Image: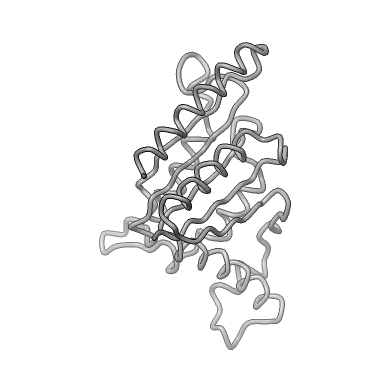
Amino acid sequence: MANILLVTSSPRGPESLSTRFATEIAEGLKTHSGGALVTRDLAANPLPHIAQAYIDGRAAAPEARTPEQVKAVGLAQELVDEVKAADIIVLGSSMINFGPSSQLKAWFDHITWPRVTFGYNEAGRPQGLLTGKKVYLVTAAGGVFSEGGWAPFDFQTSYLRHLLGFIGLTDVEIIRVEGTVFGAEAAKAAIAATEAQVRAVLEKAA
């Protein structure tokens, strides 16, 4: 059995293709493994942006934290505990202005925590502490960013891979849905291509 964490973040809600395909993967993996599935919908239940209470609170001794710091650090700890408990993480992200949504950025800001999810080795280099997990990263974009002239502007996928790797999540498989803004036929073909990727993921996991 595998514990699965599904994190969705698109402000488009049920119309979001990243949410749709990330959910299909997570539910399919749950069926195959018989494990537990925890879902965090960052669009329906957005996190606050990090503030001074979190920055100061996470550096303070627990007994010295103010009530505001206790609340801020407690939320971050809850998010980190969800990641730590997961064997598999399925992450859905829709491109907003060439990058991930602010909702997803806020999630990473909470869980990227010195001495908790990353540290530094003797050479002073960063070392991720959340290792041994599989990540399926589902990215959606209206244009085509995996190749061609727009590829250099895919700050969504490169940024998310960097953040995941920084905290130790290096086993990342990317599932893309892209090219949906070029008319009905293009959108249909793009969705069909992603459906094939999702089937391949689930067949491999079966």
Answer left or right for 115 relative to 98: left
Asked if 14 appears above or below 181 in the picture, the reply is below
Q: Quadrant of the N terminus?
A: bottom left
Q: Residue at x 55, y 16 (%)?
A: 189
- The mark total stands at 0
Answer left or right for 147 relative to 109: left
Q: Residue at x 52, y 38 (%)?
A: 138
Q: Position of residue 75 (x, y in %)?
A: 63, 69
- Tell which residue pokes out farthest to the left in this image: 122
* Front one among 51 and 7: 7
Asked if 26 appears above or below 79 in the picture, the reply is above
Q: Position of residue 74 (x, y in %)?
A: 61, 73
Answer left or right for 179 relative to 25: right
Colouring style: one colour
Asked if 170 appears above or below 37 in the picture, the reply is above
Q: Quadrant of the C terminus?
A: top left
Q: Position of residue 171 (x, y in %)?
A: 35, 46
Q: Residue at x 56, y 59 (%)?
A: 38
- Tell which residue pokes out farthest to the bottom in this image: 63
Q: Position of residue 140 (x, y in %)?
A: 58, 31
* Front one among 38 and 106: 38
* Front one among 87 and 112: 87
Answer left or right for 34 relative to 177: left
Q: Residue at x 34, y 62 (%)?
A: 120
